[in-house]
Image: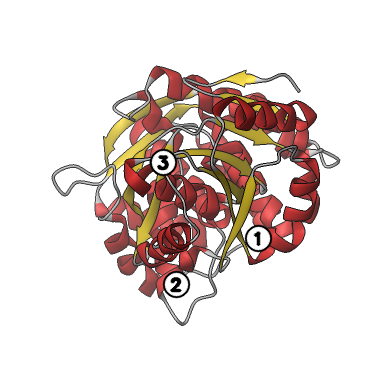
Amino acid sequence: MTSIQAVTYPIDFNEKGYDSLSTLISKNNYSTIFILVDDNTFTDCYPRFISLLATDKKIEVIQIDAGEVHKNIETCVGVWNAMTELGADRKSLLITLGGGVITDLGGFVASTFKRGIDFVNIPTTLLSMVDASVGGKTGVDLGVLKNQIGLFANPEMVLLDPEYLQTLCSREIRSGTAEIIKYGMTHDVHLYNEIKNNASLNIVDLIPRSIEIKNDVVLEDPKEHGVRKALNWGHTIGHGIESYFLESEAKERLTHGEAIAIGIICESYISSKLLGFPADKVADVKNTILTIYGKTPILTDDFLPILNFMKHDKKNIGGEINFVLLEEFEKFKINCKVSNELIQESLKYYTS
């Protein structure tokens, strides 16, 4: 896999990534290396990582509880305190080894500790490889409201090692696949068709192209003022569903990708009503996603609470919910206004 150059940092793969990381550490003469892991990645990924890291620098491991429910300021305070007690200074390096929670939270921790220390992202899930670790977004949730607190900050590098995907269950692979479907619908329909038509697909083969798409968009619009909003396809409704299911004691928590997949179906339906996205393609998208993810029970009584969570979406301006919608595959329109009635109609379409 060929390296990809982001705005200020490289995205390196496999052995070259470990060589680049060792060179980075040596060149910058970091005082201490902190490695942020969760319960899962400490057991499943840390042994491989530490065996391939070539450095004689002092290494400290900070472990947090796994799961989106711990992606909050309280966890950050715990990490900041641990780093302080372990003698972290402005010449320390934080390496995030984990999925989207670890890379988002770890980047935020590093970017705010002593007004900012260097960090490196090593994503270990498909979701974080194709999305969370690339693009310079860091942050944590506010209660169950997704990514409400954060800032833009770039890592020194991203290291992608697909071997870490061997540690994942099939549900986590499906979660990351939703982001690749998003890229396929908004930027390169080949990705969508590969997922739809190739039963023996090795999802690793789609990772480089997915990262290229996200990186190209971020290079054009780093702070999400324009075209980068297209990367929120499926996320406006999807985040509302994810937050609602996270908050409700009566609901089983969804993975990020499961919620986004529902959002893609709903927003495809809305696109057909407002922008003429072809009805046969809406049906095809619904069939493809339900084949992969099955159907999540969403009741009519759930519609209004989901809508209320959507009102906190970061893209909203002046209290209005902003959508990215499709006119056609690879042809999107940003800042679309959608009525509450049509949003609920789209949820009904999903459940029908």
Residue placed most toward the observer, 315 or 124:
124
Residue 94 in picture, x, y percent from top left = 53, 45
Q: Amino acid at mark 3?
A: Arg
**Which residue does the image show at 44% across and 19% down from the upper left?**
219
Q: Amino acid at mark 1?
A: Gly
Q: What residue is shown with label 3?
A: 90
**Which residue does the image show at 51% across and 29% down from the upper left?**
186
**Disc 1 from disc 3: Cα separation:** 48 Å
> In front: mark 3 or mark 2?
3
Q: What residue is shown with label 1?
A: 294
Q: Is residue 319 left or right of residue 101?
A: left
Q: What residue is shown with label 2?
A: 299
Q: Amino acid at mark 2?
A: Leu
Q: Is residue 341 above or below residue 210?
A: below
Q: Quadrant of residue 347?
A: bottom left
**Element marked by disc 2:** loop
Residue 139 in picture, x, y percent from top left = 39, 49
Q: Quadrant of residue 209?
A: top right
Q: Can residue 276 be seen here?
A: no
